[in-house]
Amino acid sequence: MEYDIIFVLGELFFDHPLSGAAILKRLLEKHGYNVGVIEKPTKEEEVKKLGKPKLFFAVSSGAIDSMVRNYTPLKKKRDEDKYSDYEELVPDKAVVVYCNWIKKNFKESLIVIGGTEASLRRFVHYDYWENRLRKSILFDSRADLLVYGNGEKQILEIAERTTEKLPLDSIEGTCIVSRIIPENFKELPSEEEVTDSKEKFCEMQLDLNNHTNLAQKSGQRYILQYKSPLYTSKDLDEYYELPFSRNIPLKSLRGFEFSIVTHRGCIGNCNFCAINLIQGNKIISRSEESILKEIKNLAKLPYFKGNVDDLGGPSANMYGMDCNRCDICHNDCLKCEKLDKSHSRLLQLLKKSRTIPGIRKIYLRSGIRYDFAPKIYIKEIAEHHLYDTLRIAPEHTDENVLQLMNKDKGNFKEFLQFFNSLKCGKKLSYYFITAHPGSSMKEAKELAEAVKGLDNLSLQVFTPTPMTTSTCMYYTGMDPKSKEKIYVPYTYSEKKEQKRVVLNDVMFTK
């Protein structure tokens, strides 16, 4: 069989709405294209097994960046960690490796790259694993086009244009290499400027977004980013209602088999998180009708036992916080007086979902932003929607570190007191980060003291991933907005010690 498009993925493919590649494949097939998939190739010969596509190769390392997948925060290979059952076979910098294999064997084929790894390396970026700045991944991969963020609209337009043999410039939500800058593009500091000046790197960081046409000079060429297309509730309803089999091949993922996505995007704007440069910093919610329809369809499956594994998104309680001015307003939603934080749409959805015949429980396993969750919502999910724990991410307890993380909202102690007062028989689980810019041993010890006695605590050493504000702080040693110097723990020994101090104190109290 000759395929129109061949996906080369750094992860197993499964035909489920939680898989981005599956959504793209089903959408392309709906529009009449034949799509093949090559999963986790480990050697060059494997990219040849489906032959040459009529239109293009679509390359991605998957939902997780290959370097984050393969290495711990201290740059130790996960497959060499005796305490880990890590069995992935994804090469470092998988997108570049796959593209080079394709270029070698199919010299004339068009290559489109996408996913997390490509999206976060679309401009000059700091590479933590090499401790240096790298050019845009478009240069290293030699790909023809980069799709950033969710790529449904982009990949359909690329397929249509390649079918008609039309140029591939000016497609919203993509990046290309160009010799010129078109009109109406904002020029970022050049590769040479950000390499020579950390202040310029900070300036670049402040200008990164998905809603602007951006250009960055590198040598005699430019990386052009065409602003992201607008996605709507209607679009999401279409994508998540595609005819997925929902079969999941891996036992480790079966806990998500009956999970349902309610929305995309995040308005939290955490400095260590890159989701605002992938899914965007505005909420796009599916319609209530579409979500309830998916739940009803689950209830009809012969192997469904009555429990929905998860109902949520990047932060479960952001459903319904859509902005009807997101095409023209690019301000921080959390600071907007018009933002509806009542959770009324979400509460209505939860109550209706519980009444569907064949449904025993609708569980909420996604984390929530406790700092703006009203008490009525917390009470509702505690009584009806928790399996065992409610996941929250305070991240830290030091005010200065929280400000640098952009997580200095809400009152953690008050939330704990209220949740415990519910006496619902459920517990909280906590996610904290140590060794973030601004965190010295002093802050680590204060964190250790503050979390004494807490059960279900996860502690992560900060990992600088490309394009985040926190990574900019890590690389430059300064706050990108004020240019003031920040303490940054760079040595492995201090990072390990910060983690040890916190975990030892937690274990000592149990």
Image (cartoon, helix red, strand yellow):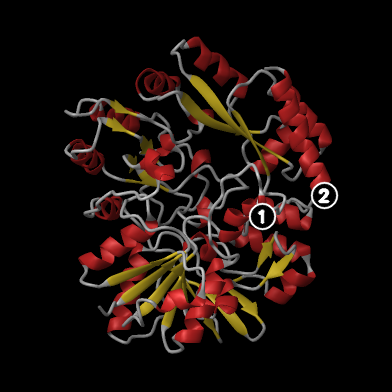
Pinpoint residue 220: horizontal percent, then vertical percent. Answer: 64, 86
Give yes or no for contact between labels 1 and 2 (Cβ–Cβ under 8 Å).
no
* Residue under the point 66% across and 55% down: 77
Q: What amino acid is at disc 1?
A: Lys
- Measuring 42% from the left and 34% from the top, which residue is drawn there? 317
Mark 1–mark 2 Cα distance, whole angstroms, equals 17 Å
Q: In the image shown, does 138 or 468 lie closer to the viewer?
A: 138
Circle 2: element type: loop
Please indicate whether residue 505 sits to the left or right of residue 426 in the image.
right
| Identity of the residue furthest to the bottom in this view | 108
Q: Nearer the viewer, residue 378 or 480?
A: 378
Q: Amino acid at mark 2?
A: Thr
Residue sitting farthest toward the front: 82
Q: Is residue 377 above or below residue 330?
A: above
Q: Is residue 137 visible?
A: yes
Could you tell me residue 406's position as x and y percent? 63, 41
Q: Does the image show residue 450?
A: no
Pointer 1: what residue? Answer: 77
Determine whether, in the image, residue 485 is placed left or right of residue 201.
right
Q: Nearer the viewer, residue 86 or 499?
A: 86
Q: What secondary structure is marked by label 1?
A: loop
Other-residue count near label 1 (Cα within 10 Å), few / some / many at <14 / 14–19 / ≥20: some
Residue 507 percent coordinates (x, y): 70, 23
Residue 491: mark in rendering: 2
